[in-house]
Amino acid sequence: MDEKSGGRAYYSDEYKLRIIQKVLSGEMSKEGALRKYGIKGHSAITNWMRSFGIHEPLKRRIYLEEPKDSPEGRELSERVKELEKELKLSELKAAAYSKMIDIAEEELSINIRKKLPTKQSGQ
């Protein structure tokens, strides 16, 4: 760190990058780095990151579910189980219908499934 006139501190790019690396690796928080290294300005490290084109990972988490121990969470959990059962049943029905068509086509020697026309070249 170099002191220039007016009391403003100037840090080398190498020094800034070392501190940014410690923050991004989780070794320390921005606030911790500001205190430990005596950096003035609460947004200095954020500004350094921007100047180097480094984007901070998103720290906010979005919760799509209610906690499972809440009444809403239990309702949602039960609804998910119900929908999963319905999906499984629908998949089984679709497989059964497909198998029935296969058997009917084989035994009756007819094409039940519609075959899509092939695209002719030169059109």
Image (cartoon, rainbow, N blue to C red):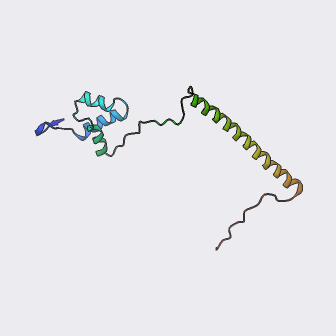
Q: Residue at x 31, y 41 (%)?
A: 49
In which quadrant will I find the N terminus?
A: top left
Q: State left or right for residue 20 relative to residue 10.
A: right
- Farthest residue toward the front? 71
Q: Position of residue 68 (x, y in %)?
A: 57, 28
Q: Residue at x 56, y 27 (%)?
A: 70
- Farthest residue toward the bottom? 122
Q: Residue at x 26, y 35 (%)?
A: 42
Q: Position of residue 44 (x, y in %)?
A: 26, 38
Q: Position of residue 111 (x, y in %)?
A: 82, 59
Which quadrant would residue 123 be assigned to in this image? Answer: bottom right
Please determine whether, in this image, residue 29 is positioned above or below residue 13. above
Please determine whether, in this image, residue 11 is positioned above or below residue 112. above
- Farthest residue toward the left? 5
Q: State left or right for residue 11 relative to residue 121.
A: left
Q: Residue at x 84, y 55 (%)?
A: 105
